[in-house]
Image (tube, grey):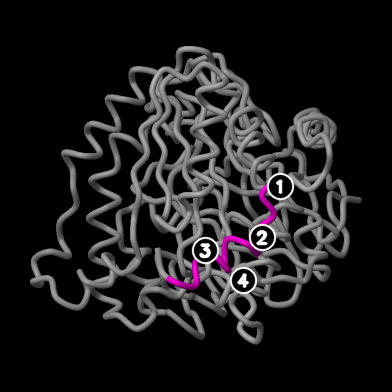
């Protein structure tokens, strides 16, 4: 432990941190008695890892297996590893993780790494490492994308992340501010967060019921720099808040969440769109994204920052240039109203409507659990090694739902539900 760590830890309210751990286990995962848990986190998030393990075992967890990462170890690779290292990934590890998921092990990921960690590294090496990792991770990703198991992602306020979000503050103050923002967005700052999540999930559910009753053929987004039509997959189903995995467990995959989302038709997207917030991807900031779609595929892509990395991402595989998700989030969401740019997709996507490049979720189809990969593809679902969300919504964006007969229904006006 370094000399300044006790001061940093003192900046984080221990009662709220414990409530966040409880939310992760009881709401995020809804961990079942006897179920194992596989957990990944930055080493700086160890205080939260310990509390989650405690709550998991109190909930009857069979075995909690944590795996910790370290920013300095990651940087050592880019500074000193041979060139061939960047085309490799620990496939043996991901095969084991895939087997764990097949055996009904729950999955929890704690995020909090410095979003700019790799900004000074060779973009080509970053892209190669990301691609190799995406390919190797496929056996495990298929279980997550297919919603075979209950899984959850949440965040911990590390010092390196806090310095990026609040660069003008002393480190302990920056951590305290980021911690409070995380607790607030995750509903861990109230006396009864479990009840608060039940109320929130019910509100999101009412949105999905309305959208599913409409059964739109497509959505049309219009705003500054944006004129985009997103066809929706045949038999698509809107989801939001708590969902039930194929193993029968109802969980909240993202903490926080303000979105309702579904699957676009991979071959029916056309027009152009610009990003409204930066995308922090694997340690690189990509900003000012502007893309054009034809027949579902991105045929032109630009960015004012990180363009080389963006184009490397788009070349990951055939599905990387097509959409796997479209999500609706009002501009008035608590995360948007906080005014904080988190440089972290888990939070920033919940401040804005967004789309995701790559892999679709099978749960966003009617009877998705029963559909084969071939059936999902036939209905318009996309397949890819990646799934990367980026933000396209603002208080200047309107969205219309378009029925098969061409009739339109206002869905969003100036960034708010119509």
Identify the element where label 1 is drawn: helix
Q: Residue at x 49, y 75 (%)?
A: 286
Task: Give the mark toward the camera: 1 or 3.
Answer: 1
Mark 1 vs 4, N-terminal side: 1
Q: Which residue is mark 4?
A: 275
| Relative vertical location of residue 336 with respect to residue 404 in this rendering, above or below | below
Distance between mark 3 and mark 2 Cα atoms: 39 Å
Identify the element where label 2 is drawn: helix
Q: Residues within 10 Å of mark 1 (few under 14, many from 20)?
A: many
Q: Which residue is mark 1?
A: 16
Segment tinted magenta in the rendering: 3-14
Query: Does any portion of residue 357 appear in the rendered image?
Result: yes
Q: Which residue is mark 2?
A: 179
Pointer 3 and pointer 4: residues touching (CB < 8 Å)?
no
Distance between mark 1 and mark 3 Cα atoms: 44 Å
- Give the position of the N terminus as an image quadrant: bottom left
- Quadrant in which residue 178 is drawn: bottom right
Task: Give the mark toward the camera: 1 or 4.
Answer: 1
Pointer 1 and pointer 2: residues touching (CB < 8 Å)?
yes
Q: Residue at x 30, y 58 (%)?
A: 316
| Relative vertical location of residue 99 with respect to residue 417 in this rendering, above or below | above
Mark 1 vs 3, N-terminal side: 1
Pointer 2 and pointer 4: residues touching (CB < 8 Å)?
no
Mark 3 vs 4, N-terminal side: 4
Distance between mark 3 and mark 4 Cα atoms: 14 Å
Identify the element where label 3 is drawn: strand
Identify the element where label 4 is drawn: loop
- Is 11 a magenta residue? yes
Task: Give the mark toward the camera: 2 or 4.
Answer: 2
Q: Which residue is mark 3?
A: 293
């Amino acid at each position: 432990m370094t000399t300044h760590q006790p001061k940093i830890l003192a900046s984080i309210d221990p009662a709220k941190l414990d409530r966040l751990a409880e939310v992760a286990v009881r709401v995020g995962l809804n961990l079942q008695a006897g179920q194992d848990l596989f957990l990944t986190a930055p080493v700086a998030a160890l205080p939260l890892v310990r509390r989650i393990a405690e709550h998991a075992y109190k909930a009857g967890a069979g075995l909690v297996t944590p795996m910790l990462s370290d920013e300095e170890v990651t940087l050592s690779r880019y500074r000193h590893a041979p060139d061939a290292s960047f085309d490799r990934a620990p496939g043996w590890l991901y095969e084991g993780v895939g087997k764990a998921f097949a055996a009904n092990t729950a999955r929890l990921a704690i995020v909090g790494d410095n979003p700019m960690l790799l900004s000074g590294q060779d973009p080509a090496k970053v892209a190669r490492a990301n691609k190799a990792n995406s390919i190797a991770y496929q056996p495990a990703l298929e279980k997550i994308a297919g919603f075979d198991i209950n899984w959850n992602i949440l965040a911990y306020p590390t010092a390196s992340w806090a310095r990026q979000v609040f660069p003008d503050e002393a480190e302990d103050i920056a951590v305290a501010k980021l911690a409070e923002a995380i607790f607030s967005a995750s509903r861990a700052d109230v006396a009864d967060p479990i009840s608060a999540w039940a109320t929130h999930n019910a509100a999101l559910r009412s949105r999905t019921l309305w959208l599913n009753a409409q059964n739109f053929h497509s959505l049309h987004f219009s705003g500054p720099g944006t004129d985009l039509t997103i066809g929706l997959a045949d038999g698509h189903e809107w989801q939001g808040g708590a969902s039930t995995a194929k193993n029968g467990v109802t969980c909240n995959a993202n903490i926080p969440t303000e979105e309702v989302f579904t699957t676009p038709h991979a071959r029916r997207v056309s027009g152009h769109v610009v990003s409204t917030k930066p995308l922090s991807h694997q340690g690189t900031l990509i900003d000012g994204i502007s893309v054009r779609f034809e027949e579902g595929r991105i045929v032109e892509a630009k960015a004012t920052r990180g363009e080389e990395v963006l184009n490397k991402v788009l070349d990951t595989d055939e599905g990387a240039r097509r959409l796997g998700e479209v999500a609706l989030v009002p501009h008035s969401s608590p995360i948007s109203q906080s005014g904080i740019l988190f440089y972290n997709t888990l939070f920033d996507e919940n401040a804005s409507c967004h789309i995701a490049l790559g892999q679709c979720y099978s749960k966003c189809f009617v009877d998705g659990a029963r559909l084969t990969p071939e059936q999902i593809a036939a209905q318009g679902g996309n397949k890819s090694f990646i799934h990367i969300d980026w933000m396209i919504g603002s208080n200047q964006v309107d969205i219309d739902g378009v029925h098969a007969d061409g009739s339109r229904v206002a869905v969003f006006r100036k960034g708010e539900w119509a």
